[in-house]
Image: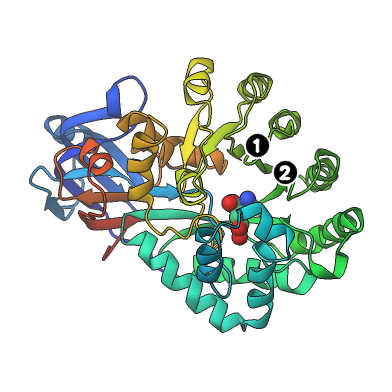
Amino acid sequence: MSAPPAQLWRHARLASFQPGTAWGWVEDAALWVEGDTLRWVGPDAALSKALPAGLPAVPERDLQGALVTPGLIDAHTHLVYGGDRAAEFEQRLQGASYEDIARAGGGIRSTVAATRAASDEVLFQLAAGRARTLMAEGVTTLEIKSGYGLNEADEARCLAVARRLGRELPLTVRTTSLAAHAVPPEFAGRPDDYISAAISWLAGQHRAGLVDAVDAFCDTIGFTPAQTERIFQAAQALGLPVKLHGEQLSDQGGAELAARYGALSCDHLEHLSPAGIRAMKAAGTVAMLLPGAYYFLRETKLPPVSALREAGVPIAIATDHNPGSSPCLSLLLMLNMACTLFRLTPEEAWRGVTVNAARALGLADRGMLATGLRADFAVWDAQHPRELAYRFGHNPCRRVVQGGIERQP
Ligand code: NIG
Ligand code: FE
């Protein structure tokens, strides 16, 4: 594909999220895009000095004061799966708990059965529809976990579907292997043997270019810290970064364990301890908070937001889109819920879906709008990003530029 032509976007109200000022705010900004990169970003009044003399005329767009933010990053999703869990939702309303259903063989395992039964094409079309819904709200980068295949072939198939989404949609996709999500029926009662099997698949997935990171669900209905550590050791031996589903339903010390492996992020964290916070701070691990799952499971224990803030642990926010605990396809709604449920400030919530989400994926080329970074941005019918955290059920996304190329939201 030939490189997109250079373009100038002028007169934006810009939330760049560059450090130093609130929101990285520039009241009247210009962005000079060349190829997939931001060649220059700054006050519109300084643009003429920034452009080299003799530059051929570059097409200009006047944004007339519309809000521009970085493209949104949904850094925790389980987007590839078959079936749904609406009946389980109904069961929960009749009194069963998420754990009861999981222990009775429903929950994740029912999605595993539906995923295994679906063809590659069906899985792709379902996931593409979900991805497009997220993209309509300005999402330009998406993480997708496996974890509903739970055997060698089906895990690889789900990761390959995620890779195909990244090739066929105007979207960056990062893949995470989450074979350690639940024990599949073939290994019932033999979780250690299942972990050995999952470890044996990893090198092949890695060789096939299917994996960017490795995750595990460490909890009473997931895996023990010892089992999780075996997965982390295998990832480390392959040079793959790790992430963790941890301290969601109980405190297993998963955050300390993940921090010892330099985890990119620990996710959920309602039951995170002070020791976990200290370990994450020391390791530079991002705290990925998932208000959709908290809301949908009607959790009452809040993640320790003030303590994370005081410790200076970077906080990210994601949809955790999955059929069981967060069937949500709106990252804008998560901005609102991060504020209303978790008491993040609108700016903290926004940093959670931009700069800190990029960090949770180990991506240094995005999450902010600054000279030299990727030209991934969204244009909104709004004056200020706080409006997008304030309203809910409302999508004012008007344009999206992904890697320098404009697409319809
Ligand atoms: O992130 N906690 C484990 N995994 C998912 C839920 C998976 C499911 O219920 O299907 C989560 O919440
Ligand atoms: Fe999850």
Q: Quadrant of residue 5?
A: bottom left
Give the image location of residue 393, x and y in percent. Answer: 26, 54
User: On the rendered structure, is 340 left or right of 165?
Assistant: left
Please state the horizontal and vertical placement of residue 397, each as a whole percent of the image: 23, 55
Q: Nearer the viewer, residue 170 or 40?
A: 170
* Disc ID at residue 45: none
Above or below: residue 264 compared with residue 345: below
Q: Read off the residue under disc 2.
A: 219
The residue that disc 1 covers is 247
Horizontal arrangement in the rendering, residue 199 relative to residue 50 (left or right): right
Amino acid type, label 2: Asp
Q: Amino acid at mark 1?
A: Glu
Disc 2 beta carbon < 8 A from ligand 1?
Answer: yes
| Residue 316: % across, % down | 48, 37
How many numbered circles does the render carry?
2
> Among all residues in the image, which is located at the extreme front?
94
Residue 151: quarter of image:
bottom right
Q: Residue furthest top?
A: 310
Residue placed at 66% from the left, 52% from the top?
A: 99
**Badge 1 density bin: few <14, some 14–19, many ≥20, Cα 10 Å:** many
Q: Secondary structure at mark 1?
A: loop
**CB under 8 Å between callouts 2 and 1?**
yes
Q: Quadrant of the C terminus?
A: bottom left
